[in-house]
Amino acid sequence: MSGDKKYKIAVMPGDGTGPEVVREGLKVLEAISKKCGFKYEKVMYDFGGERYKKTKEVLPDSALEEFKKTDAIYLGAIGHPDVKPGILEKGLLLKLRFSLKQYINLRPVKLYPGVWTPIKDKGPEDIDFVVVRENNEGLYVGEGEFIKKGTKDEIALQVSRNTRVGVERCIRFAFEYTKKRNKKKHLTLCGKTNVLTYAWDLWERTFYEVAKEYPGIKTDYTHVDATCMWMVKNPEWFDVIVTDNMFGDIITDLGAMIQGGMGIAAGGNLNPEGVSMFEPIGGSAPKYTGKNVINPLAAICALSMLLDEIGEEKASKMIENSVMKVTTKLKSLAAGKMGYSTTEVGDLVVKYL
Ligand code: IPM
Ligand code: MN
């Protein structure tokens, strides 16, 4: 980084175990900034279930404006047992993703050394791919209606909105990412062309049109159901998968499981032209809250992704390398079974930086 630039990072620890894992992430950030010599300032936000319960406020527009002036957002977890499902998800997480135009959800699925995977006979050399999930459209736009609600003839419509612009920018991102990743140079489109003949017609046409600009990248297509099958049977076939919002949501939970569980799975909500947000994808895990047993590695991996995005590639890589040492020391990645506490795992990551 040049000159006196100081990164401004919005930190939203959120609910449940969010604050515990973010604390470890910030511990690692402090240590790596000293090692790599960059400066940053954190701005803390207390949005989430507790604040909503007290004030009925989920996310004011003024906060959105403040976020737009930051370099990145670091999020812990959203979800509170006393708050009706949907309120925080829509009012906070999805609102941020949509308002800040974070149109890509990037989810690496990588099995680190020493990590147990439920897939027999597969190791780190077999499980290393990335899912590029469209993050602003599809079924997540919340379009739809009830017809004759409450009657025996009730109909509920839920619309998947796919725009050419939205689909194309996602696909373009995926091609560029596959090129930059420089591994198998293989991009798979995951969809459902055999049934969802409007949405996936658009996706498929756009995919093969853009593909013409990337002769160096091998392309193929798999239906989403078959993708699930291959992710379990032959995960080594994948390099980068691009898909829509809903399918991406589903297959990345499967991805998280084959890479060792929610304790390690991280993701980035990217606006390549704006402010991006990084999060462990595991949720708030209320039952482990406050016990110092939750695994902070997913949050630490999210921090590593954040640093890569803002231009601190070396720091990002150093954190990932340290995480790869720490995974060989833990008994398990599961909460309460690591053989170490949450804070001790954070300390280990700092130690191996
Ligand atoms: C995720 C989550 C969210 C989603 C929920 C909490 C709205 O499952 O980030 O994958 O569906 O995108
Ligand atoms: Mn999900």
Image: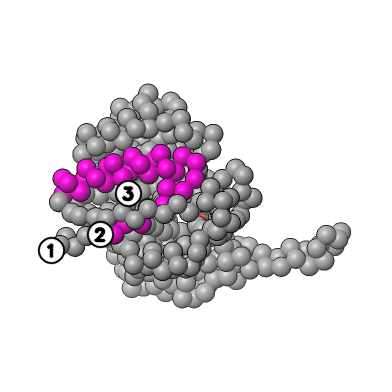
Read off the residue under disc 3: 303
Q: Tell me how many marks there are.
A: 3
Quarter-of-image position of residue 270 = bottom left
The answer to whether the beta carbon of the residue marked 1 is less than 8 Å from any atom of ligand 1 is no
Read off the residue under disc 2: 7
Residue 47 position in % (x across, y down): 48, 54
Q: Which of marks 3 and 1 is nearer the N terminus?
A: 1
- Which mark is drawn over residue 298? none
The answer to whether the beta carbon of the residue marked 2 is less than 8 Å from any atom of ligand 1 is no
Distance of label 3 from label 1 (alpha carbons) = 23 Å
Mark 2, other Cα within 10 Å: few <14 / some 14–19 / many ≥20 = some
Q: Earlier in the sequence, mark 3 or mark 2?
A: 2
Q: Residue visible at 35% across and 48% down?
A: 302
Q: Residue visible at 27% across and 32% down?
A: 348
Q: Which amino acid does label 2 sit on?
A: Tyr
Distance of label 2 from label 1 (alpha carbons) = 12 Å
Q: Is the magenta stretch mostly helix, strand or loop?
A: helix
Left or right, 57 with respect to 155, comes to: left
Left or right, 227 with respect to 219, comes to: right
- Which mark is drawn over residue 3? 1
Colour logic: one colour
Residue 265 position in % (x across, y down): 41, 44
Q: Residue visible at 46% across and 48% down?
A: 14
Please state the extent of the stretch shown in magenta in the rendering. 8-36
| Cβ–Cβ under 8 Å for marks 3 and 1 | no
**Mark 3 or 2: the one toward you:** 2
Residue 71 position in % (x across, y down): 30, 62
Q: What residue type is labelled 1?
A: Gly
Residue 322 position in % (x across, y down): 25, 38
